[in-house]
Amino acid sequence: MDTDLFLKEWGIDGTNSVRGGLLKPNPHASPRQITMLQRSETKVGKDLGKTTGWIHRASLKMKKVTMLKGVSYDRIDENGIHITIKDQTQFIEADTIIICAGQVSVNLLHEELIALGKTPTLIGGGKLVKKIDAQRAIREGSELGANI
């Protein structure tokens, strides 16, 4: 990491010669125009860590990253990505598209077992895929096993 670049970007006086040690932030320009898309309509980065999430969002804003939420992805073609936000279709021209696919619960077996009159129990990521947590999944599995 380039410490001097970091200090300049965030407006930190590394020499402590300015009162309070703060200067005007001076971020270096991003070499690309970036648009970040999110399916959910919640605040972008809402589930980032409470103590560090703000810095990630601030970094994106400093780099002038466009952040769109409530997006439905329609298709990708050779010119970019076609999306819909609140029934409004849009096209974002792009030469590079990076997909970070989140998790979606697929509980077909659970539903089929219920239809057969069985009483299955969902645990772990099958129960709550949004916040996959190994400790919670192990605890739920252990508790379920102890109760059988």
Image: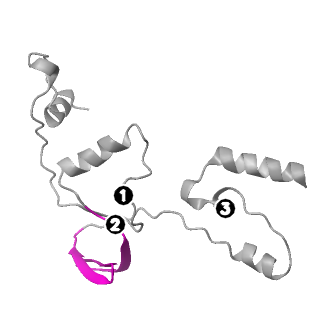
Q: Which residue is mark 1?
A: 43
The numbered disc on residue 127 is 3
Amino acid type, label 1: Lys
Residue 76: give x, y in percent of width and height: 32, 78
Examine the residues drawn in magenta and state their main secondary structure. strand
Measure the C-alpha gap from mark 1 to mark 3.
23 Å
Identify the residue at horizontal 40%, vertical 53% (top origin). Answer: 46
Residue 113 in sight: yes
Outermost residue toward the right in this view: 148
Label 2: state its secondary structure. loop
Q: Which residue is mark 2?
A: 69
Q: Sequence order check: which comes first, mark 1 or mark 3?
A: 1
Quarter holding the N terminus is top left
Q: Which residues are magenta?
A: 67-95
Identify the residue at horizontal 78%, vertical 63% (top origin). Answer: 121
Measure the C-alpha gap from mark 1 to mark 2.
8 Å
Q: Are marks 1 and 2 in contact (CB under 8 Å)?
A: yes
- Residue in the foreground of this view, choosing between 4 and 136: 136
Identify the residue at horizontal 54%, vertical 59% (top origin). Answer: 130
Which image quarter: residue 117?
A: bottom right
Question: Is residue 77 a member of the stretch shown in magenta?
Answer: yes
Measure the C-alpha gap from mark 2 to mark 3.
25 Å
